[in-house]
Amino acid sequence: MWLQIQNFQEYLDDVQQSRADVLKFWEHEAGTYYWRKPWDKVHSGGFEKGDVTWFEGGKLNITENALDRHLNSIGNKTAFIFEPNHPDSFRRTITYRQLHEDVCRFANVLQDKGIEKGDRVCIYMAMTPELMIAALACARVGAVHSIVFAGFSAQSLAERIQDCDAKMLITNDGLRRGDKHVPLKDISDEALENCPSVHSVIVCQRTNREISWVEGRDEWWHMLIRNASKEHKAVEMDAEDPLFILYTSGSTGKPKGVLHTCGGYMVYTSYTFRNVFQVREDDVYWCTADAGWITGHSYILYAPLVNGATGIIFEGTPTYPDAGRFWEVVEKYRVTHFYTAPTAIRALMTFDLDFVKKYDLSSLKVLGSVGEPINEEAWNWYNTHIGGGRCPIVDTWWQTETGGIMISPLAGVTPTKPGFATLPLPGIFPVLMDENGDEIQGNGVSGNLCISHPWPGMARTVWGDHERYLQTYMSAYKGYYFTGDGCRRDQDGYYRITGRVDDVLNVSGHRLGTAEIENAINEHPNIVESAVVGYPHDIKGQGIYAYLICEHAPADLKAFKAEVHQVVNKMIGPIAKPDLIQVVPGLPKTRSGKIMRRILRKVAAKEHDQLGDVSTLLDPSIVPVIVEGEAC
Ligand code: PRX
């Protein structure tokens, strides 16, 4: 189970083997898991038609690989350590055997409530073991889970439920995140006013606050599991049956339901977890992501369990009750592997080093970074103060759509360089494209990042909109998967991701579409039109800058900004609030009416001398007016 690439030569050999015969390479990897019946075909289809399959005809249930398979060997090993929001609250550890029982019980509950293979179940919960149990139970009965980050608003939750016609919602009464309380059940109730597909709501108790109740629809988790059997035979799935939908932002206003399937996703995420992090049997692995994002799905939930690792589920935030929280947890559980986002590192760097020095971090062996480019300063701080200069940093580049890590060092195996995701995993073939759509050869070059051959973990479609899937990923460069990222390949062939080249922002590692934010902002009655761009932000990586055309000039700009925040909170959630707003009399538009965001980005970044050619604008005189305007 713990077969890992041991050294750089082995990595190069595996790359070579995967180049020589990529199907054989992945087939060999797939052979190390438990299948009820082997696949008929290793792989078929391609990017052009977007009809990729892996291991089709193979029958499995991912939870048998994540749980049942381990019972005889490591049943008493800790699968999850739960660290609650407040350090003094009740914490617990759950063995593989207990987790198996809990998942079986809840799978029986789901089936009793009429959930069948292929049904969609929405999960909107606090970061607790029950969230993991809910997702695994869905997978066990063949239901497709859609986990929605418990920071999204009622409106966003409703959109996601409606898009996939979920039959059931699983939520909590509420959650605490730092010193904030989020009333999840109230938000759910509001969302469900517009979601006729949901007949059943299961509520797991977390905050014990008063909540409203709809008789006949709502039921308590603890009541339902009380008499449920701990025996459950997992439903047989085809490798290509859907496992989950995860909504993510794109260039248009509507989030996309990225769909992952059972077999390829399991094989790919497990392979990458084992080799990138190099987790060993007695290690304690901690990924600080939320389960509402792909990092939580792949590298808290599925891959660590399939590999039989011990992982931490953390409900809290990096700065609650103080900025030493991460390091206190590392010391308490003797964490060996720590995987977080650059935004968290940058935020913690601003505090006194005493918050770090107070704790014994000598257990750490590997550090990870994910979600956005990590700047050199943050990399060096992480390396020196957290890793003590002895822990390799794996800067892992990947996306919701890729399912698992694509370009990254393998810990202790690949020589690292600050700011570089370094080299692709074996079986992954990145290429850079120029503006003519041709592959750029050689090193010391930059271009748009594409992948030239399908891999098992890739998303298979956008739920209910295959055309959009083809349009977004497969149409920019025929025969390639387009990532939406810009990238540099340096003299040594090392990859450095430079950021998105489309209208997608990366704010604190969260992916947000500019159109999505604009749609929300435009709901304000005084706003006629808006244009949102990203700008460099010391902590968040990118901040949100909104240019607003108003019907009447706002009398009090600060109060107006607060109103804009309120609207965005309601439509999307607090993560999408603009950091800066600027009221403008017009926007720089081309003759065909397209907003020239390049100019707005330069103004937001205060790079006024780099505005470039503005002569193709319908009204170039708007540019100096915007440059001279003030942001609030
Ligand atoms: O721009 C890249 C950035 O995050 C995008 C994917 O976002 P999402 O689907 O939300 O998944 C985030 C977690 C995997 C990418 O297109 N990104 C992710 N990891 C890195 C990164 N940018 C630079 N370096 C990374 N390590």
Image: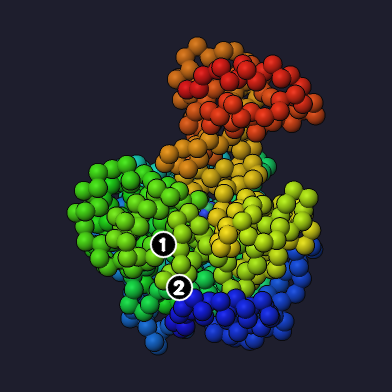
Q: Please state which amino acid type lies under the numbered disc 1.
A: Ile
Is residue 179 toward the left or the right of residue 88 in the image? Answer: right
**Residue 562: image tag:** none
Q: Residue at x 40, y 53 (%)?
A: 379
Q: Residues within 10 Å of mark 2 (few under 14, many from 20)?
A: some
The picture places residue 544, in percent across and down from the top left corner, at 52, 35
Q: Please state which amino acid type lies under the numbered disc 2.
A: Val
The picture places residue 139, in percent across and down from the top left corner, at 54, 69
Q: Which residue is mark 2?
A: 413
Q: Nearer the viewer, residue 484 or 303?
A: 484
The quarter of the picture where residue 241 lies is: bottom right
Whether residue 257 is visible to the viewer of this picture, yes or no, is no
Q: Determine whether 51 is above or below 613 in the image.
A: below
The picture places residue 192, in percent across and down from the top left corner, at 55, 46
Task: Tell which circle, 2 or 1, labels the residue nearer the N-terminal end.
Answer: 1
Q: Determine whether 516 is above or below 392 in the image.
A: above
**Residue 393: image tag:** 1
Q: Nearer the viewer, residue 219 or 338?
A: 338
Q: Nearer the viewer, residue 79 or 46?
A: 46
Is residue 290 toward the left or the right of residue 42 in the image? Answer: left
Q: Residue at x 60, y 54 (%)?
A: 488
Q: Residues within 10 Å of mark 1 (few under 14, many from 20)?
A: many
Is residue 473 toward the left or the right of residue 444 in the image? Answer: right
Question: Could you tell me which secondary element the residue under label 1 belongs to?
Answer: strand
Whether residue 582 is visible to the viewer of this picture, yes or no, is yes
